[in-house]
Image (tube, rainbow, N blue to C red):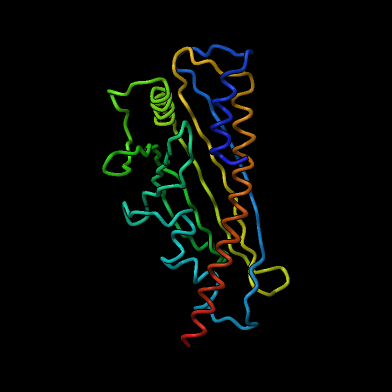
Amino acid sequence: MKMKQFLSLLICLLALDQIVLVQAEKQVEFVGKGSAQIDIIPSSSSVPDSASLEAFLRREESNGLLLGTNDIVPYTDDHWDCKQPSFRLFGKDFIPIFRVGLWRYIENNGLLRILVAVKESRTAMLRQQDDGARLHSSLSSNTSGSNEQQQDWMLNMLQRGKIEGESEIMVKPSNNGKGWMLSMSTSLKMKMNVPKYLPLPPGFAMIGSVVMNQQCQDRAHKSLVELGQAYAEWSEQRKQKA
């Protein structure tokens, strides 16, 4: 189940007969973890250090892959504002924007370790206007109609929420001596301050955590595959230029 499907499911669950009333300022927390590893085997049996997987992951062109999106804007030398893929709810597109830190380390044993961490997060809503679509990161004060009120309520809940995440990527020599073993462990935590008297179904947090776990697992594997494919393309381009 994808995140946008999960968010839609949460709204459907609110219509269930068996609900509990949540007091004001109660915090709901979803937690997910995932890990994956793959072997990266170069096309040539002899690879110079300058063309290794580690060399590629140290380069700026790998930043978008490591940050999870190419829609990035530098904030500081090691932090970026990263616009994530949108999800659709109540006929509107909600767009998470993360401020993400990216650090590369060489361990004492010479292995490359990369740390990616979400430091801040916010959610914007894309609304259609006469002059085209534009982002709204705050609520409109003059909306009318139940559907728009639902949209604004959901945006308000998402904006009040907090997302924390961290991924660690390690590069090691492959066990068979050919290429490298690329691994990733990732965790994601979403905290929401639920509005006063918001009705929530039993197991709300558990459902969210199950979906978050699957999201983290899928994302970890997909990220490693994309890194491997990008490295293969970069390596091939280097050969052609040589």
Residue 77 is situated, as x and y percent measured from the top left of the image, at 33, 57
Q: Is residue 5 above or below residue 17?
A: below
Image quadrant for the N terminus? top right
Q: Residue furthest bottom?
A: 242
Q: Is residue 74 above or below residue 53?
A: above
Q: Quadrant of residue 21?
A: top right
| Residue lying at 39% horizontally and 22% vertically, measured from the top left | 149
Residue 116 is situated, as x and y percent measured from the top left of the image, at 48, 51
| Residue lying at 41% horizontally and 24% vertically, measured from the top left | 153
| Residue lying at 56% horizontally and 18% vertically, measured from the top left | 200
| Residue lying at 33% horizontally and 21% vertically, measured from the top left | 144
Q: Residue furthest right?
A: 176
Q: Is residue 24 above or below residue 109?
A: above
Q: Is residue 205 left or right of residue 193?
A: right
Q: Nearer the viewer, residue 159 or 56?
A: 159
Q: Nearer the viewer, residue 72 or 87?
A: 87
Q: Residue furthest front?
A: 130
Q: Nearer the viewer, residue 193 or 187?
A: 193
Q: How many marks?
A: 0
Residue 4 is situated, as x and y percent measured from the top left of the image, at 54, 38
Residue 134 is situated, as x and y percent measured from the top left of the image, at 31, 42
